[in-house]
Amino acid sequence: MSTLSVPPTLVSPRDDVLHLHKAFKGFGCDTSAVINILAHRDASQRTVIQHEYRALYSEDILNRLTKELTGKLENAVLLWMKDPATRDAVALRQALLANDLRGATEVICSRTPSQILTFKQIYLSRFGSYLEHDLEKYASGDHKKLLLAYVSIQRYEGFEVDRMIAENDAKTLYRAGEKRLGTDEDIFIKIFSERSRAHLAVVDSTYNGMYGHSLEKAIKKETSGLFAYALLTIVRCAENPAKYFAKVLRKAMKGLGTDDTTLIRVIVTRVEIDMQYIKAEYQKKYKKSLVDAVHSETSGNYRKFLLALLGPKH
Protein backbone atom coordinates (compact mmCIF):
# COMPACT_ATOMS: atom_id res chain seq x y z
CA MET A 1 0.00 0.00 0.00
CA SER A 2 1.22 3.43 -1.02
CA THR A 3 1.66 6.35 1.39
CA LEU A 4 1.58 8.90 -1.42
CA SER A 5 -1.02 11.64 -0.94
CA VAL A 6 -2.16 13.22 -4.19
CA PRO A 7 -4.58 16.18 -4.37
CA PRO A 8 -8.25 15.11 -4.19
CA THR A 9 -9.08 17.32 -7.17
CA LEU A 10 -7.13 16.68 -10.35
CA VAL A 11 -4.50 19.32 -11.06
CA SER A 12 -3.63 19.93 -14.69
CA PRO A 13 -0.04 18.91 -15.56
CA ARG A 14 0.33 22.23 -17.38
CA ASP A 15 -0.47 24.13 -14.17
CA ASP A 16 2.10 22.00 -12.32
CA VAL A 17 4.70 22.79 -14.97
CA LEU A 18 3.96 26.54 -14.88
CA HIS A 19 4.29 26.55 -11.08
CA LEU A 20 7.51 24.55 -11.22
CA HIS A 21 9.00 26.88 -13.81
CA LYS A 22 8.05 29.83 -11.65
CA ALA A 23 9.76 28.15 -8.65
CA PHE A 24 12.96 27.74 -10.70
CA LYS A 25 13.02 31.35 -11.91
CA GLY A 26 14.59 34.29 -10.14
CA PHE A 27 17.31 34.33 -7.50
CA GLY A 28 17.41 30.93 -5.82
CA CYS A 29 14.92 28.12 -6.21
CA ASP A 30 11.61 28.04 -4.31
CA THR A 31 12.39 24.55 -3.05
CA SER A 32 9.23 24.29 -0.92
CA ALA A 33 7.06 24.85 -4.00
CA VAL A 34 8.97 22.12 -5.89
CA ILE A 35 8.52 19.67 -3.00
CA ASN A 36 4.83 20.54 -2.57
CA ILE A 37 4.18 19.58 -6.18
CA LEU A 38 6.50 16.65 -6.91
CA ALA A 39 6.11 14.83 -3.57
CA HIS A 40 2.35 14.68 -4.16
CA ARG A 41 2.18 13.33 -7.71
CA ASP A 42 2.03 9.64 -8.65
CA ALA A 43 4.24 7.91 -11.23
CA SER A 44 1.98 8.62 -14.22
CA GLN A 45 1.53 12.26 -13.20
CA ARG A 46 5.30 12.71 -12.84
CA THR A 47 5.81 11.27 -16.33
CA VAL A 48 3.27 13.69 -17.83
CA ILE A 49 4.95 16.60 -15.99
CA GLN A 50 8.27 15.66 -17.62
CA HIS A 51 6.72 15.54 -21.12
CA GLU A 52 4.79 18.77 -20.58
CA TYR A 53 7.86 20.62 -19.25
CA ARG A 54 9.90 19.61 -22.29
CA ALA A 55 7.06 20.65 -24.64
CA LEU A 56 6.70 24.08 -23.01
CA TYR A 57 10.32 24.97 -22.29
CA SER A 58 12.40 22.70 -24.60
CA GLU A 59 14.33 21.51 -21.57
CA ASP A 60 14.49 18.26 -19.61
CA ILE A 61 13.07 18.94 -16.15
CA LEU A 62 15.60 16.48 -14.67
CA ASN A 63 18.43 18.70 -15.94
CA ARG A 64 16.69 21.70 -14.44
CA LEU A 65 16.24 19.95 -11.08
CA THR A 66 19.96 19.06 -11.11
CA LYS A 67 20.78 22.76 -11.51
CA GLU A 68 18.30 23.97 -8.89
CA LEU A 69 18.70 21.38 -6.11
CA THR A 70 21.76 20.14 -4.23
CA GLY A 71 22.99 17.30 -2.05
CA LYS A 72 20.71 14.69 -0.56
CA LEU A 73 17.51 16.45 -1.64
CA GLU A 74 18.73 16.47 -5.25
CA ASN A 75 19.54 12.73 -5.07
CA ALA A 76 16.13 11.91 -3.58
CA VAL A 77 14.09 14.03 -6.02
CA LEU A 78 15.96 12.82 -9.11
CA LEU A 79 15.45 9.18 -8.09
CA TRP A 80 11.77 9.90 -7.37
CA MET A 81 11.23 11.35 -10.86
CA LYS A 82 12.30 8.11 -12.56
CA ASP A 83 9.97 5.19 -13.25
CA PRO A 84 10.35 2.20 -10.86
CA ALA A 85 12.45 0.01 -13.16
CA THR A 86 14.82 2.87 -14.08
CA ARG A 87 15.14 3.72 -10.37
CA ASP A 88 16.22 0.14 -9.66
CA ALA A 89 18.72 0.16 -12.53
CA VAL A 90 20.19 3.50 -11.41
CA ALA A 91 20.29 2.54 -7.70
CA LEU A 92 21.99 -0.73 -8.62
CA ARG A 93 24.59 0.95 -10.82
CA GLN A 94 25.33 3.56 -8.14
CA ALA A 95 25.70 0.86 -5.49
CA LEU A 96 28.09 -1.19 -7.63
CA LEU A 97 30.25 1.83 -8.54
CA ALA A 98 30.40 2.85 -4.86
CA ASN A 99 31.33 -0.73 -3.90
CA ASP A 100 28.16 -0.84 -1.79
CA LEU A 101 27.54 -4.54 -2.33
CA ARG A 102 24.93 -4.72 0.42
CA GLY A 103 22.91 -2.05 -1.39
CA ALA A 104 23.23 -3.90 -4.71
CA THR A 105 22.24 -7.16 -3.01
CA GLU A 106 19.18 -5.52 -1.45
CA VAL A 107 17.94 -4.25 -4.83
CA ILE A 108 18.47 -7.59 -6.59
CA CYS A 109 17.31 -10.03 -3.91
CA SER A 110 14.20 -8.08 -2.84
CA ARG A 111 12.74 -7.79 -6.35
CA THR A 112 10.47 -10.18 -8.26
CA PRO A 113 11.69 -12.00 -11.40
CA SER A 114 9.62 -9.73 -13.68
CA GLN A 115 11.00 -6.61 -11.98
CA ILE A 116 14.53 -7.96 -12.43
CA LEU A 117 13.92 -8.72 -16.11
CA THR A 118 12.75 -5.13 -16.73
CA PHE A 119 15.51 -3.35 -14.83
CA LYS A 120 18.15 -5.54 -16.51
CA GLN A 121 17.01 -4.29 -19.93
CA ILE A 122 17.08 -0.66 -18.72
CA TYR A 123 20.50 -1.22 -17.12
CA LEU A 124 21.90 -2.36 -20.47
CA SER A 125 20.32 0.45 -22.53
CA ARG A 126 21.24 3.14 -20.01
CA PHE A 127 24.78 2.13 -19.07
CA GLY A 128 25.86 0.12 -22.13
CA SER A 129 26.83 -2.83 -19.96
CA TYR A 130 25.15 -6.11 -19.09
CA LEU A 131 24.29 -6.33 -15.38
CA GLU A 132 25.81 -9.84 -15.34
CA HIS A 133 29.15 -8.46 -16.57
CA ASP A 134 29.18 -5.84 -13.82
CA LEU A 135 28.30 -8.41 -11.17
CA GLU A 136 31.22 -10.54 -12.43
CA LYS A 137 33.43 -7.49 -12.02
CA TYR A 138 32.31 -6.22 -8.60
CA ALA A 139 31.09 -9.29 -6.67
CA SER A 140 33.03 -12.42 -5.75
CA GLY A 141 32.77 -15.98 -4.48
CA ASP A 142 29.47 -17.60 -3.52
CA HIS A 143 27.85 -14.16 -3.23
CA LYS A 144 28.59 -13.54 -6.91
CA LYS A 145 27.33 -17.01 -7.89
CA LEU A 146 24.04 -16.42 -6.07
CA LEU A 147 23.48 -12.94 -7.56
CA LEU A 148 24.24 -14.17 -11.08
CA ALA A 149 21.80 -17.06 -10.68
CA TYR A 150 19.18 -14.79 -9.12
CA VAL A 151 19.19 -12.27 -12.00
CA SER A 152 19.20 -15.02 -14.67
CA ILE A 153 16.51 -17.48 -13.59
CA GLN A 154 12.83 -16.78 -14.28
CA ARG A 155 11.17 -17.99 -11.08
CA TYR A 156 7.45 -18.71 -10.73
CA GLU A 157 5.65 -15.70 -9.21
CA GLY A 158 2.35 -17.31 -8.22
CA PHE A 159 1.20 -18.64 -4.85
CA GLU A 160 0.81 -22.35 -5.53
CA VAL A 161 3.29 -24.55 -3.67
CA ASP A 162 3.99 -28.27 -3.92
CA ARG A 163 4.41 -29.16 -0.25
CA MET A 164 6.22 -32.43 -1.01
CA ILE A 165 8.93 -30.51 -2.92
CA ALA A 166 9.08 -27.89 -0.15
CA GLU A 167 9.58 -30.62 2.46
CA ASN A 168 12.27 -32.20 0.32
CA ASP A 169 14.01 -28.79 -0.06
CA ALA A 170 13.97 -28.30 3.73
CA LYS A 171 15.64 -31.71 4.21
CA THR A 172 18.16 -30.99 1.42
CA LEU A 173 19.12 -27.65 2.99
CA TYR A 174 19.54 -29.28 6.39
CA ARG A 175 21.80 -31.96 4.90
CA ALA A 176 23.77 -29.31 2.98
CA GLY A 177 24.22 -27.12 6.05
CA GLU A 178 23.65 -27.97 9.67
CA LYS A 179 23.95 -31.75 9.35
CA ARG A 180 27.41 -31.78 7.81
CA LEU A 181 30.83 -30.36 8.56
CA GLY A 182 31.24 -27.42 6.22
CA THR A 183 28.40 -26.06 4.09
CA ASP A 184 27.51 -27.09 0.55
CA GLU A 185 26.91 -23.53 -0.70
CA ASP A 186 25.94 -24.68 -4.20
CA ILE A 187 22.83 -26.40 -2.82
CA PHE A 188 21.78 -23.19 -1.07
CA ILE A 189 22.39 -21.20 -4.27
CA LYS A 190 20.35 -23.65 -6.36
CA ILE A 191 17.29 -23.73 -4.08
CA PHE A 192 17.29 -20.00 -3.25
CA SER A 193 17.67 -18.91 -6.88
CA GLU A 194 15.23 -21.40 -8.44
CA ARG A 195 12.28 -21.43 -6.03
CA SER A 196 9.42 -18.94 -5.83
CA ARG A 197 8.83 -16.67 -2.83
CA ALA A 198 5.72 -18.60 -1.84
CA HIS A 199 7.66 -21.86 -2.03
CA LEU A 200 10.58 -20.55 0.09
CA ALA A 201 8.15 -19.29 2.74
CA VAL A 202 6.77 -22.84 3.02
CA VAL A 203 10.31 -24.29 3.06
CA ASP A 204 11.10 -21.98 5.98
CA SER A 205 8.05 -22.99 8.04
CA THR A 206 8.68 -26.67 7.20
CA TYR A 207 12.32 -26.33 8.28
CA ASN A 208 11.16 -24.77 11.54
CA GLY A 209 8.73 -27.63 12.15
CA MET A 210 11.34 -30.29 11.38
CA TYR A 211 14.42 -28.88 13.09
CA GLY A 212 13.05 -26.56 15.78
CA HIS A 213 14.32 -23.27 14.40
CA SER A 214 14.01 -21.07 11.33
CA LEU A 215 15.91 -21.29 8.09
CA GLU A 216 17.15 -17.77 8.89
CA LYS A 217 18.88 -19.08 12.02
CA ALA A 218 20.48 -21.88 9.99
CA ILE A 219 21.73 -19.37 7.37
CA LYS A 220 23.32 -17.22 10.09
CA LYS A 221 24.99 -20.29 11.59
CA GLU A 222 26.20 -21.86 8.35
CA THR A 223 27.12 -18.90 6.12
CA SER A 224 28.64 -15.44 6.54
CA GLY A 225 29.27 -12.04 4.96
CA LEU A 226 27.56 -10.91 1.78
CA PHE A 227 26.53 -14.45 0.85
CA ALA A 228 24.60 -14.73 4.13
CA TYR A 229 23.12 -11.26 3.58
CA ALA A 230 21.85 -12.26 0.12
CA LEU A 231 20.28 -15.50 1.40
CA LEU A 232 18.67 -13.66 4.33
CA THR A 233 17.30 -10.97 2.00
CA ILE A 234 15.70 -13.62 -0.21
CA VAL A 235 14.12 -15.57 2.66
CA ARG A 236 12.96 -12.43 4.53
CA CYS A 237 11.35 -10.99 1.39
CA ALA A 238 9.68 -14.37 0.75
CA GLU A 239 8.04 -14.13 4.18
CA ASN A 240 7.41 -10.41 4.69
CA PRO A 241 9.05 -7.76 2.49
CA ALA A 242 7.69 -4.89 4.65
CA LYS A 243 9.35 -6.33 7.77
CA TYR A 244 12.60 -6.71 5.83
CA PHE A 245 12.58 -3.07 4.66
CA ALA A 246 11.65 -1.81 8.14
CA LYS A 247 14.82 -3.53 9.38
CA VAL A 248 16.94 -2.04 6.56
CA LEU A 249 15.64 1.45 7.39
CA ARG A 250 16.31 0.97 11.11
CA LYS A 251 19.89 -0.07 10.38
CA ALA A 252 20.37 2.97 8.10
CA MET A 253 19.38 5.31 10.93
CA LYS A 254 20.88 3.53 13.93
CA GLY A 255 24.06 4.67 15.66
CA LEU A 256 26.29 7.56 14.77
CA GLY A 257 25.39 9.18 11.45
CA THR A 258 22.74 8.19 8.93
CA ASP A 259 23.20 6.07 5.82
CA ASP A 260 21.32 8.51 3.57
CA THR A 261 21.94 6.52 0.39
CA THR A 262 20.02 3.57 1.84
CA LEU A 263 17.38 5.81 3.42
CA ILE A 264 16.67 7.53 0.08
CA ARG A 265 16.74 4.30 -1.94
CA VAL A 266 14.32 2.41 0.30
CA ILE A 267 11.85 5.24 0.92
CA VAL A 268 11.74 6.41 -2.71
CA THR A 269 11.45 2.91 -4.21
CA ARG A 270 8.84 1.58 -1.74
CA VAL A 271 6.49 4.59 -1.30
CA GLU A 272 4.17 3.51 -4.12
CA ILE A 273 4.45 -0.21 -3.36
CA ASP A 274 4.22 -1.14 0.33
CA MET A 275 5.28 1.83 2.49
CA GLN A 276 2.09 1.72 4.56
CA TYR A 277 3.01 -1.85 5.58
CA ILE A 278 6.64 -0.90 6.21
CA LYS A 279 5.50 1.90 8.54
CA ALA A 280 3.27 -0.55 10.43
CA GLU A 281 6.10 -3.10 10.76
CA TYR A 282 8.52 -0.38 11.91
CA GLN A 283 6.11 0.79 14.63
CA LYS A 284 5.44 -2.80 15.75
CA LYS A 285 9.09 -3.84 15.94
CA TYR A 286 10.80 -0.66 17.20
CA LYS A 287 7.95 0.99 19.18
CA LYS A 288 8.60 4.24 17.33
CA SER A 289 6.99 5.62 14.19
CA LEU A 290 9.08 5.63 11.02
CA VAL A 291 8.01 9.25 10.49
CA ASP A 292 9.51 10.26 13.88
CA ALA A 293 12.69 8.29 13.17
CA VAL A 294 13.21 9.99 9.78
CA HIS A 295 12.36 13.38 11.31
CA SER A 296 15.06 12.98 13.96
CA GLU A 297 17.71 11.76 11.49
CA THR A 298 17.25 14.33 8.70
CA SER A 299 16.88 18.10 8.35
CA GLY A 300 15.82 20.97 6.09
CA ASN A 301 14.16 20.48 2.72
CA TYR A 302 15.58 16.95 2.49
CA ARG A 303 13.59 16.04 5.63
CA LYS A 304 10.53 17.85 4.28
CA PHE A 305 10.62 15.85 1.03
CA LEU A 306 11.02 12.43 2.70
CA LEU A 307 8.27 13.18 5.24
CA ALA A 308 5.94 14.31 2.42
CA LEU A 309 6.47 10.90 0.75
CA LEU A 310 5.95 9.00 4.01
CA GLY A 311 2.68 10.77 4.84
CA PRO A 312 1.21 11.08 8.34
CA LYS A 313 2.20 8.80 11.23
CA HIS A 314 -0.99 6.76 11.21
Image (spheres, rainbow, N blue to C red):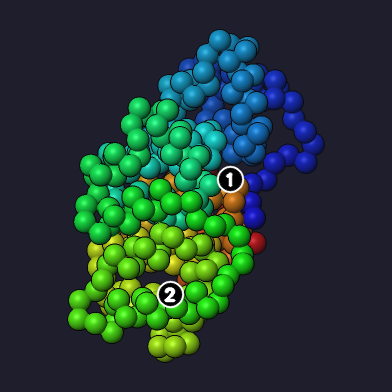
Three-letter code for the amino acid on which mark 1 is drawn: Ala
Asked if residue 84 is positioned above or below residue 49 in the image, the reply reads below
Q: Quadrant of the C terminus?
A: bottom right
Three-letter code for the amino acid on which mark 2 is drawn: Asp
Asked if residue 203 is positioned above or below residue 127 in the image, the reply reads below
Residue 50 percent coordinates (x, y):
59, 23
Residue 107 percent coordinates (x, y):
42, 50
User: Is label 1 in a helix, a strand or a loop?
Assistant: helix
Residue 16 percent coordinates (x, y):
67, 25
Residue 27 percent coordinates (x, y):
48, 17
In the image, taking residue 263 as reference, residue 56 lies left or right, namely: right
Q: Which residue is mark 2?
A: 169
Q: Residue at x 46, y 21 (%)?
A: 63
Q: Nearer the viewer, mark 1 or mark 2?
A: 2
Is residue 227 visible to us here? yes
Asked if residue 197 is positioned above or below residue 304 in the image, the reply reads below
The foreground one among 298 and 147 is: 147
Q: Which mark is residue 188?
A: none
In the image, taking residue 41 as reference, residue 228 lies left or right, namely: left
Q: Residue at x 74, y 30 (%)?
A: 11
The foreground one among 42 and 310 is: 42
The foreground one among 301 and 184 is: 184
First reached walking from the N terminus: tag 1 or tag 2: 2
Asked if residue 97 is positioned above or below residue 186 in the image, the reply reads above
Q: Which residue is mark 1?
A: 308
Mark 2: few/some/many CA within 10 Å (<14, 14-19, 20+): many
User: Is label 2 in a helix, a strand or a loop?
Assistant: helix
Q: Residue at x 37, y 77 (%)?
A: 172
Mark 1: few/some/many CA within 10 Å (<14, 14-19, 20+): some
The foreground one among 314 and 168 is: 168
Q: Quadrant of the N terminus?
A: bottom right
